[in-house]
Amino acid sequence: MTQAETIVRKSVSYFQIGGTTAEDLDRELERRGPATRASGSRHPGATQIKFGGELDYVQSAGRCRLGNVDVTLDTRIILPQWKNRKRAKGDLALIWDALSSDIKRHEERHAEIARQYARKLERTLKKLRPQRNCDAMQAKVAEATDRVIAAHDTAQMDFDRVEAVNFENRMMRILEYRAGQNTPKN
């Protein structure tokens, strides 16, 4: 019987930005934000994703099957940290808090999508039927892995596409909610 366990490791790191105006913050995010390989441009946040793992091929009774399967996922979330936040006044603090919470939520969701696909990869590999030899089994593993990773990449791009379309409305809702929380109650 094939055993499987998805091992997930997550870390968070920050990059510093400065500035005292919304324009400063925008410029700093564009200048200091992490660059992604997919677009080559800088972003206000990023999630680095690395799938890996180990598995054993077991040859018995003229067939090759998988033994232990350990899928690993390493995610590193990179977020902005505004060094002038404590001194920020009024609207700029409200805007920053809304924006930074949205960036964090967005990147956490990328990490969650990756976790879902790491588990899917584990289940897919676990279901592979024994093959006539280990070369054939290795080819099945590669094919299954390629298929799951391609689906993962598509899911990540679809998420970004939906997020981009809804960004302005989402930010307005967040700002209205936060402004309502800061309004004195009579």
Image (cartoon, helix red, strand yellow):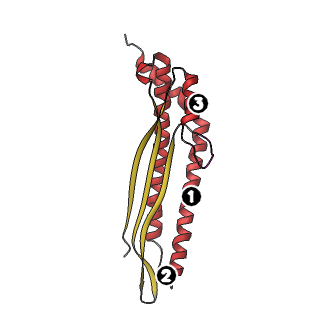
Q: Is residue 79 magenta?
A: no
Circle 2: residue type: Cys
Q: Quadrant of the C terminus?
A: top left
Could you give the CA–CA distance between mark 1 and mark 3, rounded to whole angstroms? Answer: 28 Å
Position in image of residue 20 (x %, y %): 51, 20
Q: In what quadrant of the picture does the N terminus appear?
A: bottom left
**Residue that extends furthest to the bottom in the rendered view of this protein:** 62
Badge nearest the viewer, 2 or 1: 2
Q: Which residues are magenta?
A: 35-41
Badge 3 crowding class, 10 Å Cα cut-off, few under 14, some 14 to 19, many 20 or more, is few
**Which label is found at residue 151?**
1
Residue at point 53%, 29% (across, down): 171
**Label 2 neighbourhood size at 10 Å, few (<14), some (14-19), many (20+)?**
some
Q: Which residue is mark 3?
A: 168
Please name the predominant secondary structure of the magenta segment in the image. loop
Identify the mark nearer the N-term, 3 or 2. Answer: 2
In the picture, the disc for residue 134 is 2
Give the SS element for disc 1.
helix
Q: In the rendered view, tell whether residue 116 sits above or below residue 85.
A: below
